[in-house]
Image (cartoon, helix red, strand yellow):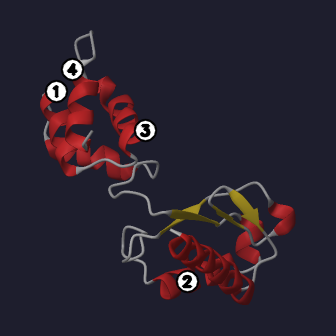
C-alpha cells in the first residue's frame, strides 16, 4: 500500500467527524504504517481536517517524532544527552555525516543508513553511545565507529554474495 492509499484508508476508516484535534494522531498513524509522512499524505490530512496544508506541515515539522523520508536499511541513533555530549558524541555525529554522506533528511545517498540524533538513550554509563538497528554500542570513538560500520557493510556484502 502506498503512503497516499494508506493515509486514505486511515482517514476513511474514522467513524467520527474529524477535527483539528485529530491532526497529530492521524499523522502518527500514517507514519506508523508507512515509516514517514509524505507530502501527499499531508495534503489528504489537510483536506480531511479542512485546514491549510501549511498548518499540517507546520505541526509535523515542529515535532521531531515525524519523518518526511523513508528510513534506511540501518538506523543509527546518536545519543546527544549530557553524558554523551561531554564524551564527544557530537564528533561521532559529525563523523557519521561525513562518512555516510548524509543528506539533510538524515539518510545516506544510497538509502542504506538513516542517522537520527536523540535526546538520551538512557545508557549514560557507556557514553558516548549509539544504537544501531536496536543494539547499543558504547564507549565509542570514531575509530570504533568506523570498525562497526565496516562490519555492517561486510555483512551486507556477504549476504549479497550468498544470494
Which residue corresponds to mark 1?
48
| Residue 105 in which image quadrant | bottom left
How many residues crowd mark 2 within 10 Å: few (<14), some (14–19), many (20+)?
A: few
Spatial separation of the CA atoms under disc 4 and disc 2 = 43 Å
Image x and y of residue 157, in percent: 55, 78
Viewer-side residue, 81 vs 8: 8
Relative depth, front residue between 162 and 25: 162
Task: Point out the tag, 4 or 1, that comes first from the N-terminus.
Answer: 4
Residue 116, percent from left and from top = 52, 64
Precedes in sequence: disc 4 or disc 2: 4
In the structure shown, which secondary structural element does the residue marked by tag 4 occupy? helix
Q: Badge 4 local density, few (<14 within 10 Å), some, or many (20+)?
A: few
- Residue 12 is labelled as 4
Which comes sooner in the sequence, label 4 or label 3? 4
Using residue 155 as the reference point, say whether residue 42 is left or right of it. left
Give me the residue at 42% from left, 78% from top.
Answer: 102
Q: Quadrant of residue 146?
A: bottom right
Quarter of the image for residue 91 reads bottom right
Question: In the structure shown, which secondary structural element does the residue marked by tag 2 occupy?
Answer: helix
Rounded to the nearest whole Å, what is the CA distance between mark 4 and mark 1?
9 Å
Q: CA distance from mark 3 to mark 2?
A: 29 Å
Of tags 1 and 3, the one toward the viewer is 3
Query: Which residue is at the far front?
Result: 162
- Residue at numbered disc 2: 94
Which comes sooner in the sequence, label 1 or label 2?
Answer: 1
* Alpha carbons under labels 1 and 3: distance apart: 19 Å
80 to 9, vertically: above or below: below
Q: Residue at x 76, y 78 (%)?
A: 140
Query: Please, is residue 12 above or below residue 106 in the view?
Result: above
Would you name the residue on which mark 3 appears?
32
Residue at image coords 62%, 59%:
133
Left or right: 5, with 85 as reference point: left
Amino acid at each position: 500500500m502506498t503512503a497516499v492509499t494508506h493515509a486514505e484508508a486511515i482517514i476513511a476508516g474514522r467513524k467520527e467527524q474529524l477535527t483539528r484535534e485529530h491532526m497529530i494522531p492521524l499523522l502518527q498513524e500514517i507514519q506508523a504504517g508507512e515509516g514517514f509522512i509524505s507530502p501527499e499524505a499531508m495534503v489528504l490530512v489537510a483536506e480531511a481536517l479542512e485546514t491549510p496544508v501549511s498548518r499540517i506541515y507546520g505541526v509535523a515539522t515542529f515535532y521531531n517524532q515525524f519523518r518526511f523520508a523513508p528510513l534506511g536499511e540501518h538506523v543509527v541513533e546518536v545519543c546527544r544527552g549530557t553524558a554523551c555530549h561531554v564524551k564527544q558524541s557530537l564528533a561521532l555525529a559529525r563523523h557519521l555525516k561525513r562518512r555516510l554522506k548524509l543528506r539533510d533528511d538524515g539518510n545516506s545517498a544510497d538509502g542504506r543508513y538513516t542517522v537520527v540524533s536523540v535526546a538520551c538513550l538512557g545508557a549514560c554509563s557507556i557514553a558516548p553511545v549509539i544504537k544501531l538497528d536496536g543494539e547499543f554500542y558504547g564507549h565509542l570513538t570514531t575509530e570504533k565507529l568506523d570498525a562497526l560500520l565496516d562490519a555492517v557493510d561486510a555483512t551486507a556484502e556477504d549476504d549479497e554474495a550468498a544470494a
